[in-house]
Image (cartoon, helix red, strand yellow):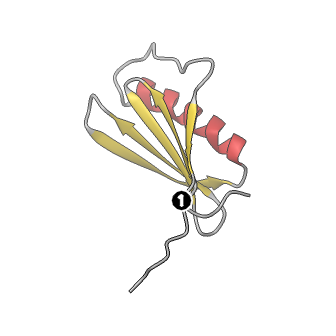
Amino acid sequence: MPPRGYACLAELTPLTLEIQLSADGLWTMQLFDQRAGCRVIMPPSEFDLDAAKQKAIASAEFYMRKYGGDRSWTSPPVAEWREFTPREVVWES
């Protein structure tokens, strides 16, 4: 399992999706809409990374059709996810 704070980003123009591993082992999702200049925060819901990615893409399509003003928008067949793994922070004094 990835470490706490591990995140993945996907660009689905005009949206950016971010999923991040929370302290309790669930994946949270945030959707950033560049056209509207807003962020949508979804509640934690998945324990599996692949399931979280699939849910994020499905949620993006739902968002664009219902709230994004583009009823014909479909998610791409393949989303490229960039991964971010936080490093341990060592404080020196």
Q: Nearer the viewer, residue 57 or 83?
A: 83
Describe the element under mark 1 as helix, strand or loop.
Answer: loop
Q: Percent x, y for residue 1?
A: 74, 58
Residue drawn at (57%, 28%), measured in percent from left and top? 80
State whether residue 15 is above or below residue 47: above
Q: Which residue is mark 1?
A: 86
Quadrant in the picture for the C terminus? bottom left
12 or 81, which is in the foreground?
81
Q: Nearer the viewer, residue 82 or 45?
A: 82
Q: Residue 85 is drawn in which quadrant?
A: bottom right
x then y, percent, for residue 29: 51, 48
Say what amino acid the circle numbered 1 marks. Answer: Pro
Q: Horizontally, is 40 left or right of 27 in the view?
A: left
Which residue is painted at 42% across and 35% down in the image?
16
Q: Is residue 4 above or below residue 74?
A: below
Residue 8 position, x and y percent, is 55, 44
Q: Which residue is drawn at the image coordinates 40% and 30% (left, top)? A: 15
In the image, farthest residue toward the bottom:
93
